[in-house]
Amino acid sequence: MFALRTLAIPRGGVLRILPLRGVSTLADNADIYVHALDSGKKKHLLTLHSTSAPNPRLALGTTTSLPPTPSTFVENPAFLPLLQRVLREHASKDPQVQADALGLANATAAPLFTDRARRRQGGSGGANYQGGAGGGGVGGWVHVYDQRGVPAFGRIADTEDIFGSLLVDAHGQIVDKEVGGVWEESRMYRLVSGRGVMRLTPYLRDRVREALEAEEKRGSEA
């Protein structure tokens, strides 16, 4: 347990200081909180929720540079399973994902995905393919992607930016969305890429924060 001492960083510096809280966030991603792990501020813990006593088990990981890069970031192996658990339960209810699903149904230029066996190639499930909904009841897969790498219309996000995929019917509706949908996790996703640190939609960010805060509360009561 430690107390984070904040410094006044000039405008254009790496850290943004939050008034009254004494907590810093990444300059290019205000959703990610930064906690110094040593007095020399050479190593930092990154978390998605604000806390005065950050738990490494609930953090994204650590970094030796700000902003973090793929080569300076070390992932917390416990974070991605928690993230995937939340996405599996809530991604189908995200307004942004639902809008993407409807757009997929109307994107006549999108490649059809009719052979479900193909989605298992490469071990990354539906994340390798995004199929447009076509005629004859044919649906497809809509990707749930990191907002740091929003693809251009009609394009597919990079694999390292795709959390997973949800099955969509021919009308652009997420199949079984009330019970989480048909979710295919992408094992190619990376918390930190050349585009930066994970950036969730507001809806999914709030759901993940709720899960982290619940875990933190359980830990404090144990």
Image (cartoon, grey):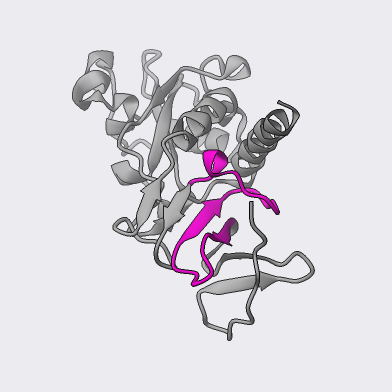
The verdict on residue 189 being magenta is no
Q: Locate residue 77, reporting x and y percent.
A: 41, 36
Q: Which residue reaches farthest bottom?
A: 10
Is 155 situated left or right of 84 in this image?
left
Residue at horizontal 52 percent and vertical 25 percent from the top: 85
Does 122 sit above or below residue 4? above
Work out whether residue 5 or residue 33 is closer to the camera in this orientation and state it.
Answer: 5
Looking at the image, which is closer to me, 206 or 96?
206
Tell whether 130 sits left or right of 44: left
Q: Quadrant of residue 39?
A: bottom right
Q: Is 121 above or below relative to 163?
A: above
Counting from the top left corner in percent of width and height, residue 102 is at 51, 33
Tell me residue 143's x, y (percent): 41, 35
Going by the image, does 221 lie left or right of 157?
right
Q: Tell me: residue 89, above or below residue 136.
A: below
Residue at 76% in and 71% down: 19
Q: Which residues are magenta?
A: 32-60
Q: Nearer the viewer, residue 129 or 41?
A: 41
Residue 59 vs residue 30, the one in the foreground: 59
Could you tell whether 63 is left or right of 15 in the image?
left
Residue 153 appears in the figure: no
The reply to whether residue 65 is visible in this rendering is yes
Q: Is residue 48 magenta?
A: yes
